[in-house]
Amino acid sequence: MSVSSRRSLHELIEALPDAEIEAARRALQEPLERATLGTLEDAQARVERRLLEAGQLAKIPRREDILGRPKTPRPRLSGKTIAETIIEERR
């Protein structure tokens, strides 16, 4: 971009009211966020595909499968907590 084009853009931006500048910022930010998210999702998909090919995954988990999984209850342990044990040992 030439220097004169940059100056023209700066002049146009300076003439805009704050509300329009904010609207333009939001309009530009949304596609950038979607592109970044898409890149992260693509990276995750590549990792999952490689794990599947290496035999480390039986199938690639879907988001619905992960979110719909039943919660497994935590086992109840008897005795003192780790924090209590550490505090006693430090005394």
Image: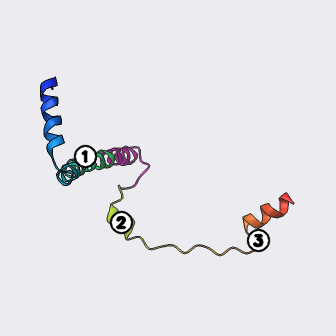
Kind of residue at badge 3: Lys
Q: N-terminal of the two: label 3 or label 1? A: 1
Mark in the foreground, 1 or 2:
1
Mark in the foreground, 2 or 3:
3
User: Residue 22 placed where, x, y %?
Assistant: 22, 52
User: Residue 50 placed where, x, y %?
Assistant: 37, 43
Seen from the viewer's position, the closer of residues 28 and 58 is 28
Q: Disc 2 versus disc 3: distance between alpha carbons?
A: 36 Å
Kind of residue at badge 1: Leu
**Residue 80's disc number:** 3
What residue lies at 41% left-to-right and 70% top-to-bottom? Answer: 69
Residue assigned mark 1: 32
Badge 2 element: helix
Residue 1, by quadrant, is top left
Q: Which residues are magenta?
A: 42-58
Kind of residue at badge 2: Asp
Mark in the foreground, 3 or 1:
1
Q: How is the image coloured?
A: rainbow
Seen from the viewer's position, the closer of residues 7 and 51 is 7
Q: How many residues crowd mark 2 within 10 Å: few (<14), some (14–19), many (20+)?
A: few
What residue lies at 13% left-to-right and 39% top-to-bottom? Answer: 12
Specify whether 69 is left or right of 79. left
**Residue 89's disc number:** none
User: Residue 89 placed where, x, y %?
Assistant: 84, 60
Please tell me whether residue 19 belongs to the stretch shown in magenta.
Answer: no
Specify whether 83 is left or right of 74. right
* The C terminus: image quadrant: bottom right
Residue assigned mark 2: 65
Magenta part mainly helix, strand or loop? helix
Seen from the viewer's position, the closer of residues 91 and 58 is 91
Badge 3 element: loop
